[in-house]
Image: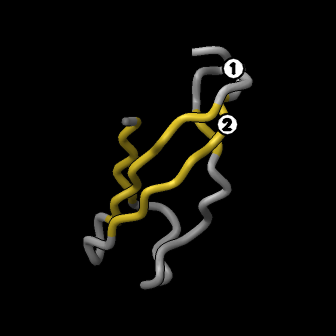
Amino acid sequence: MLKNQRAKVTIRCNVCGEKFTLRGRREPGGQVETGFKQCLCDNDKHFSVDET
């Protein structure tokens, strides 16, 4: 996948279990940036991120 292409990402909150499915852009380092900042439960650090 090229760095300019979009990737589908599933983010799961490790505190409350809420699940978010987002699209993001791949950065040069291989990570996907979605713009996701925090969960509905105010958690902003403990997430599981899986690329699909």
Left or right of residue 9, residue 12 in this image:
left
Quarter occupied by residue 5: top right
> Disc 2 residue type?
Arg
Quarter of the image for residue 50 reads: top left
Q: Quadrant of the C terminus?
A: top left
Q: In the image, is residue 27 above or below residue 48? A: above
Residue at coordinates 42% horizontally, 84% vertically from top-left?
A: 41
Task: Say what secondary structure mark 2 lies in.
Answer: strand
Q: Is residue 6 above or below residue 15?
A: above
Q: Is residue 48 above or below residue 46?
A: above
Q: Residues within 10 Å of mark 1 (few under 14, many from 20)?
A: some
- Residue at coordinates 67% horizontally, 56% vertically from top-left? 35
Residue nearest the viewer, comparing 15 with 49: 49
The residue sitting at the top extreme is 2
Q: Which residue is mark 1?
A: 3
Q: What amino acid is labelled 1 in the image? A: Lys
Q: Position of residue 21 (x, y in %)?
A: 43, 57
Q: Residues within 10 Å of mark 2 (few under 14, many from 20)?
A: some
x, y (%) of residue 37? 61, 65
**Sequence-earlier tag: 1 or 2:** 1
The answer to whether residue 39 is left or right of residue 1 is left
Q: Which type of secondary structure does the marked residue at label 1 adopt?
A: loop
Q: Are marks 1 and 2 in contact (CB under 8 Å)?
A: yes
CA distance for labels 1 and 2: 7 Å
Q: Which quadrant does the N terminus fall into? A: top right
Give the residue number, with chain letter if any, for mark 2. Answer: 25
Q: Is residue 31 above or below residue 22?
A: above
